[in-house]
């Protein structure tokens, strides 16, 4: 048992650190530090920098632009990226639809979509959830009927993150209403410019516009945009959801938040002394740090196991990562609010382009919105209750 | 980075697992507990035969040459058996003090005896007022000729009732809590002026109150605190591993129960509320296991601040996970979990005692917090 890294791994880590902190524009990374919303342009720019050396899609098969890295390299890569405040590559492109097309798409689809997906020339969004189908996703009802060489799509998707930026949407649609719920679903790629699609924003409690409703009214989709086989979409969706694995713990991101909280708590005062010297605050932060260290160790155990396991198999401990990782991320946003104290109150999200001076310190403005926004982390990607159901069944055999 | 065991470690684990699996069932343990010293002499001889009593000692002294990872392997399995024998007191504490504070001559004289199972050790450091502060020592050591004379009283000396020789901290100079001036001494348990009162502990092990009245003893070290602290850090890492073993059993036993117990005409494990609580036990267990590994790796760290922070972090995690797993194990069993005749309560009791040894989760959280936490720039001590 040895927690050190090999000289090669350390060299790789330094290379990654150097790249992230020099090649990715500081203006974008600073926004991540401050918790400011990123524009579409920020996300695309950052991803293109990564893609310039094939680092946007490291999780893809090598043949389509991925990296044949060891799990340790992947871990170090993610950790450094998050510590350097580099935005994650667009998840819909890189973690979700890209691997599905690479695995189940035909040659034409791969050639047509993968390079543009890697380079963020296409910005994807995900059409899975529906108003009546959240945790029970397989009950989805958006209908796609094949007429000649076109699918005609009718229905509604919801919680569609960044649909306002998206060029394309990958959708789960019902192609067989007679079959069992899971067996009548297909995986369809739809151009967002197709007539009949309407996007309506949903404003979340932080005041932000991240998610949307997407309506489909007789939207005609060429049959060639079907991925894999008709009615096999549920298998592809499960493949997609199982792909996130260790990255979901967001250990590096939380480490960066801890460090940020310490910096800011040194600037704020609790009585005569900086807040960072307040024993009660120190203990609250240390308690989260311990949870984070335990999570990091658990993630490293999963990473180490992955090296030995057949590709595609999943260590049961990985489902624990999301459960713990999400709660830790949320706890850190609470602590950040605590740091800024009364300056948590002013609502200063600048939707109308007014140029009023900031009330209180700049770093205080996003503390409350981030806290509100991060309540989503234990809900999306399979709520923590669903994660517990999965662990109970798959690991505990209950 | 590597979590794999070496070939030697794997063999060690297999043999200890087999020993505990075959010879340390719950009923067998009950039998050992009724033997005269409160544990099994036959088992102790077997530990010696297997080389376990020489685990942390250099091969030059006839030891196994193991480090904290080997200790972790053995202690985790011992945790699963709720081992009663004085392995922790003799090998982890006593052996640690021998290794880190003992002269070459003392090591050469005693290690072979410990390894052979002929010499049991204990460490007397707790005093009525000291709580967990190792520097808080009022027992005095007065220079007399080439040696010292010790006077004072030590409490809750683990397996102090059966030890042949006892390490004692005593103050040579300075005030009650000064870090300097704490000496480490070794006395025969039967030396004139040593009186012992042995008693059982809540978890079925043994301890003793020890009074020292004009006891003549040689100094092992005259400025012993750094070495003592390192040994206690190693001891905490060992207890973390033992705790993981106890938690593993509580988790497994509870899961079995959920899969066999029926109420309302169904297995109770089919109820979602119990499934989720069972998952949370698993999450707590895995967090503890991760931090016990972290503690094992960091136990040999020479930078005392880095080591202290890491070990404290592990002790916090173990304490919190242990309390959660233990309390839930009892609750999910219901009435049967409350009984002496059922196993799970005994694991719960051991886990609960571990939480109160060498500082509780809250004590260690305060230590870690004062030292600036785990991430980011290290703070000067």
Image (cartoon, coloured by chain):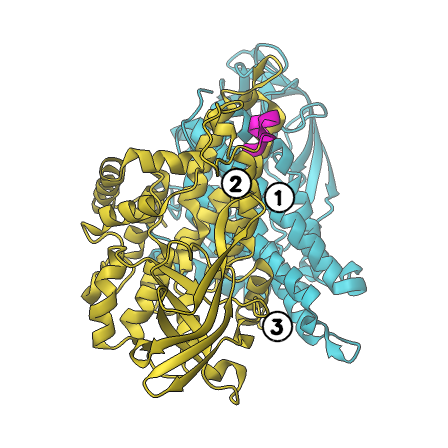
Chain colours: A yellow, B cyan
**Circle 3: element type:** loop
Q: Residue A333, image x and y in percent? A: 54, 39
What residue sits 69% from the left and 65% below the top?
Answer: B274
Q: CA distance from mark 3 to mark 1?
A: 27 Å
Disc 1: which residue: B319
Q: CA distance from mark 2 to mark 1?
A: 31 Å
Disc 2: which residue: A370
Q: Which residues are magenta?
A: A336-346
Disc 3: which residue: A398
**Circle 2: element type:** helix
* Residue A19 seen anywhere in this rendered image of the structure: yes
Is the stretch drawn in magenta largely helix, strand or loop? helix
Residue A398 left/right relative to A259: right
What residue sits 52% from the left and 86% below the top?
Answer: A177
Marks 3, 1 in one chain: no
What residue sits 28% from the left and 45% below the top?
Answer: A46
* Residue B44 seen anywhere in this rendered image of the structure: no
- Chain name for mark 1: B
**Relative to B242, does residue A385 appear above or below in the rendering?**
below
**Circle 1: element type:** helix
């Amino acid at each position: 048992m040895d927690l050190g890294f090999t000289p090669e791994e350390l060299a790789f880590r330094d290379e990654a650190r150097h790249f992230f902190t020099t090649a990715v524009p500081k203006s974008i990374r600073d926004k991540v530090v401050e918790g400011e919303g990123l524009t579409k342009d920020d996300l695309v720019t950052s991803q293109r920098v990564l893609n310039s050396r094939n680092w946007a899609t490291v999780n893809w098969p090598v043949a389509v632009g991925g990296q044949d890295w060891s799990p340790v390299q992947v871990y170090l890569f993610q950790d450094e990226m998050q510590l350097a405040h580099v935005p994650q590559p667009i998840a819909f492109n890189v973690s979700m639809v890209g691997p599905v097309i690479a695995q189940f798409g035909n040659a034409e689809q791969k050639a047509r979509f993968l390079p543009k997906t890697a380079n963020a020339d296409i910005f994807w969004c995900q059409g899975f959830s529906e108003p009546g189908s959240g945790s029970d996703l397989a009950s989805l009802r958006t209908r796609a009927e094949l007429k000649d060489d076109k699918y005609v799509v009718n229905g509604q998707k919801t919680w569609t993150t960044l649909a306002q930026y998206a060029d394309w949407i990958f959708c789960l649609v019902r192609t067989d209403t007679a079959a069992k719920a899971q067996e009548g679903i297909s995986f369809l790629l739809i151009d967002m410019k197709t007539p009949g699609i309407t996007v309506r924003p949903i404003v979340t409690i932080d005041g932000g516009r991240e998610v949307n409703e997407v309506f489909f009214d007789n939207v005609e989709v060429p049959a060639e945009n079907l991925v894999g086989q008709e009615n096999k979409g549920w298998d592809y969706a499960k493949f997609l959801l199982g792909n996130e694995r260790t990255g979901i713990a967001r250990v590096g991101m939380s480490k960066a938040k801890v460090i940020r909280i310490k910096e800011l708590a040194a600037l704020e005062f609790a009585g005569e002394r900086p807040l960072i010297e307040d024993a009660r605050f120190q203990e609250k932060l240390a308690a989260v740090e311990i949870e984070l260290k335990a999570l990091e160790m658990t993630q490293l155990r999963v990473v180490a196991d992955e090296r030995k396991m057949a590709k595609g198999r999943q260590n049961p401990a990985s489902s624990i990562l999301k459960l713990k990782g999400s709660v830790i991320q949320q706890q850190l946003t609470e602590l950040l609010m605590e740091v800024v104290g009364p300056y948590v109150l002013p609502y200063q999200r600048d939707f109308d382009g007014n140029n009023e001076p900031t009330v209180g310190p700049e770093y205080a403005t996003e503390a409350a919105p981030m806290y509100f926004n991060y309540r989503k982390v234990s809900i999306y990607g399979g709520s923590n209750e669903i994660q517990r159901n999965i662990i109970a069944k798959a690991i505990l055999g209950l | 980075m590597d979590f794999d065991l070496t070939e030697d470690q794997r063999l060690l684990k297999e043999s200890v697992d087999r020993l505990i699996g075959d010879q340390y069932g719950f009923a067998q343990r009950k039998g050992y507990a009724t033997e005269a010293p409160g544990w099994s002499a036959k088992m102790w001889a077997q530990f010696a035969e297997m080389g376990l009593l020489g685990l942390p000692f250099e091969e030059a002294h006839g030891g196994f040459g193991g480090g904290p990872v080997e200790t972790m392997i053995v202690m985790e399995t011992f945790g699963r058996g709720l081992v009663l024998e004085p392995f922790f007191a003799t090998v982890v504490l006593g052996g640690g003090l021998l290794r880190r504070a003992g002269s070459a001559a003392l090591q050469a004289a005693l290690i072979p005896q410990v390894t052979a199972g002929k010499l049991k050790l204990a460490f007397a450091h707790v005093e009525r007022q000291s709580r967990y502060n190792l520097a808080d020592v009022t027992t005095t050591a007065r220079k007399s000729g080439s040696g010292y004379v010790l006077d004072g009283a030590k409490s809750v000396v683990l397996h102090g009732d059966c030890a042949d020789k006892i390490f004692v901290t005593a103050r040579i100079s300075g005030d009650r809590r000064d870090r300097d001036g704490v000496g480490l001494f070794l006395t025969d348990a039967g030396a004139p002026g040593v009186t012992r009162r042995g008693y059982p502990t809540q978890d079925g092990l043994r301890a003793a109150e020890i009074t020292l009245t004009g006891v003549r003893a040689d100094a092992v070290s005259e400025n012993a605190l750094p070495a003592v602290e390192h040994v206690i850090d190693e001891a905490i890492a060992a207890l973390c591993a033992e705790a993981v073993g106890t938690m593993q059993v509580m988790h497994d036993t509870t899961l079995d129960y959920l899969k066999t117990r029926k109420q309302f005409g169904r297995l109770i494990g089919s109820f979602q509320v119990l499934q989720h609580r069972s998952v949370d036990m698993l999450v707590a267990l895995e967090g503890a296991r991760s931090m016990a590994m972290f503690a094992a790796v960091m136990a040999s760290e020479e930078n005392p601040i880095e080591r202290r922070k890491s070990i404290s972090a592990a002790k916090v995690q173990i304490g919190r996970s242990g309390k959660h797993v233990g309390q839930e194990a009892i609750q999910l069993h219901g009435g049967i979990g409350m009984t002496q005749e059922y196993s799970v309560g005994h694991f719960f009791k051991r886990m609960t005692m571990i939480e109160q040894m060498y500082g509780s989760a809250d004590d260690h959280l305060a230590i870690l917090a004062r030292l600036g936490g785990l991430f980011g720039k290290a703070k000067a001590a």
